[in-house]
Image: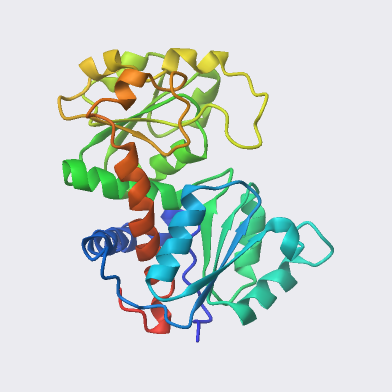
Amino acid sequence: MASTSPAHFLDLPDVGADELKAILKSAHEMKRVKFTPPQHFSGMSLAMIFDKKSTRTRISFEVAMKQLGGHTIVMNAEEIQLSGAESLEDTGKVLSRFVDAVMIRMSNHDILSELASHSTIPFINGLTDHSHPCQIMADLMTVEEKLGDLSGRKVAWYGDYNNVARTWGQAAKLFDFDMAFAVPEDQHADITDFTATCNAKLAAQDADILVTDTWVSMGQEGKGTEKFEPFKVTGDLFSAAKDHAIFMHCMPVHRGHEVSDDVLSSAKSVIYDEAENRLHAQKAILMWCLKDTNVKV
């Protein structure tokens, strides 16, 4: 049975550095045994709820749960009446009686938090407009694979200060690495604990990782992108970074827009390793969330 104090995975600071490091260690182990996954979740169910389209989040969570012996139920938000007459309290309590955990990918972070507050099973943030912790765990795993220890690294973020950028900032505080945000000036006020600059090359100075995201996320169609043009990641920026610097992007990627083709086609790009690591990070997150059901982490 699930604990009455479920291990939600909603935001990185809520989990804490020590637990996150343990999850990353588990993720590396899950990748090592990729072709012989342990059957931790036999007889267990994960509900996956979406109000946004998804490639990597849906496939990685579905494969993760099934490879570890469990099964999934996939629904869109309208199918469970999140926009209907039933209260969030009732929805959270009912889901707790049917499944062992819930992963939600939706715009409204407050709704996710309220659902979780009424549940007795773990809720996992598959993405909200506020944060994207599952993605950043896969990203951190990829950095560890490629460069080793996270502590003392420098990450340069380019483009829009969005949910992914915000979560990178959360991770930097927890894992003791530095961030520089090359973003439009009107977003600088949102960045209080790290360098915010309009100088793209300055942000790349001595960076270990250059990272960006799409300038127009789902639900933002029609958004102007002109102000992001100076923050396109190009090969020239890597001349200011460290020799071993890598390029990251959580995808979907718009080639020639937020990043140039020469960067994407270079050995610096690790975007497909990053995408694959969603699967292994997701396994480790599920194992952590369900640790009170006798799953071995």
Quick one: 52 or 207, which is closer to the camera? Answer: 52
Quick one: 145 or 208, which is closer to the camera? Answer: 145
Q: Is residue 38 above or below residue 29?
A: below
Quadrant assignment, res 286: bottom left
Relative side of 288 to 110, left or right: left
Residue 18 visible? The answer is yes
Report the coloring of the rendering: rainbow
Residue that lies at the very extreme toward the right in this rendered image: 85
Residue in the picture at 58% in, 77% down: 99
Q: How many marks?
A: 0
Relative side of 249 to 125, left or right: left
Residue 14 visible? The answer is no
Residue in the picture at 34% in, 17% down: 234
Q: Is residue 117 above or below residue 53?
A: below
Residue that lies at the very extreme toward the bottom in this rendered image: 1
Relative side of 149 to 292, left or right: left
Location of residue 292 in the rendering, given as x and y in whole percent from the top left corner: 41, 80
Quadrant assignment, res 15: bottom left
Q: Is residue 233 above or below residue 284?
A: above
Residue in the picture at 25% in, 25% down: 266
Location of residue 74 in the rendering, given as x and y in whole percent from the top left corner: 60, 63
Quick one: 61 or 86, which is closer to the camera? Answer: 61
Q: Is residue 275 above or below residue 8?
A: above
Residue in the picture at 61% in, 73% down: 119
Location of residue 9 in the rendering, given as x and y in whole percent from the top left corner: 47, 61
Q: The C terminus lies in which quarter of the figure?
A: bottom left
